[in-house]
Image: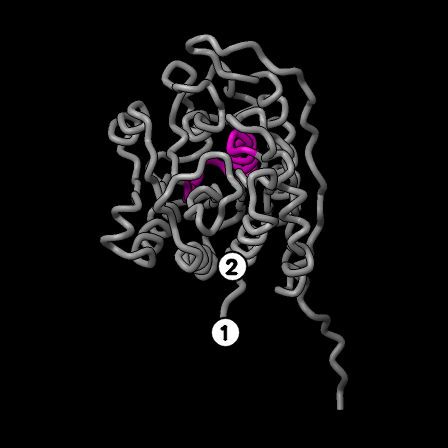
Amino acid sequence: MAVSNASSPPRPLVDLIGVPLDYGAGRRGVRFGPEAVREAALQSRLERLGYAVNDAGDVDVAVVSDEPAREPGHARYAAPIRAACLNVAGAVERALAREAFPVVLGGDHSLAIGVLAGVARVKGTGGIIWIDAHADLNTPSSSPTGNIHGMSMAAALGDVPELFGPPEFPTPSVDSGRSVFVGLRDLDPAEKRALHSRGLTCFTMSDIDRMGLAKVMERAVDIAGRGPGSVHVSLDIDAIDPLTAPGTGTPVAGGLTYREAHLAMEIVAESGVAHSIEVVEVNPTLDDGRATAKVAADLICSALGKSIL
């Protein structure tokens, strides 16, 4: 009997990239999010799913002193956030260049500017499924706070070129026609105008109540997955109801349930369209123990294929 020398296929690669950044948020402490999610046994759980996991560590984030009171039209901590996002873009670019799946752990949502720049450098302008209570479509002139975590999608669409412009930040880094918002329930006036004027696809919590989460996610996958390039999934933990995920700086009642959030990630996994994911705004200093960090790790595993059966 001949003995087969065929080796088993290589395991798919995952790069864990931590971003201990909280200058973009109104409340500090979210910089401890990457460590907390890692401590929820994320790497070993992904390895049990069959992945070869490389923990790339944390990107460098400069330590700076507090800024003075914000002036109208001014984006707070713009310089250190831009520098951190450049480091994030480089880490994501390197991961994709080696055909790994980047799993980015935040940190506040301003880091998405860097993630999407890194994806666009390798994959070109692609689709995005943005799961968040907020649209993050403000600009420095429209933001009521000046916090850049509320401007990240605006920057990715090319609306903040004075801070995040090419060549370092390809703009737009996402296709507006393939950008889908899921779970919105807290929008500023300028964000509402941007959603309407750009014709962006959005599913609010009211839409989810009416349609059901499964149908919403199936449509989101279909829209974001059209055309060439990749699909990035951006999950802000405040999309989840604060009764389930209390450890975040901008909680809004009435969010996704634990099961709905898992179903969303399971549908992403089944579709096979996603090539990268970030999970942001886990703030251990506001958490009930490590409950929110565990939820974040659970959802990452679901997005990468963990299922009930």
User: Which of the two discs, 2 and 1, labels the residue nearer the N terminus?
Assistant: 2
Q: Which mark is on residue 309? A: 1
Say above or below: 272 vs 28.
below
Position in image of residue 246 (x %, y %): 49, 45
Question: Of the residues shown, which amino acid type is indicated by label 1?
Answer: Leu
Q: Which residues are magenta?
A: 108-132
Position in image of residue 177 (x %, y %): 33, 37
Can you tell which quarter of the image residue 46 is in?
A: bottom right
Q: Is residue 305 visible?
A: yes
User: In the image as oriented, which residue stretches furthest toward the front?
Assistant: 288
Q: How busy is the neighbourhood of tag 2: few (under 14 within 10 Å), some, or many (20 plus)?
A: many
Q: Is residue 271 visible?
A: no
Q: Which mark is on residue 213? A: none
Question: Of the residues shown, which amino acid type is indicated by label 2?
Answer: Ser
Q: Which residue in the structure is indicated by mark 2? A: 302
Position in image of residue 78 (x %, y %): 55, 17
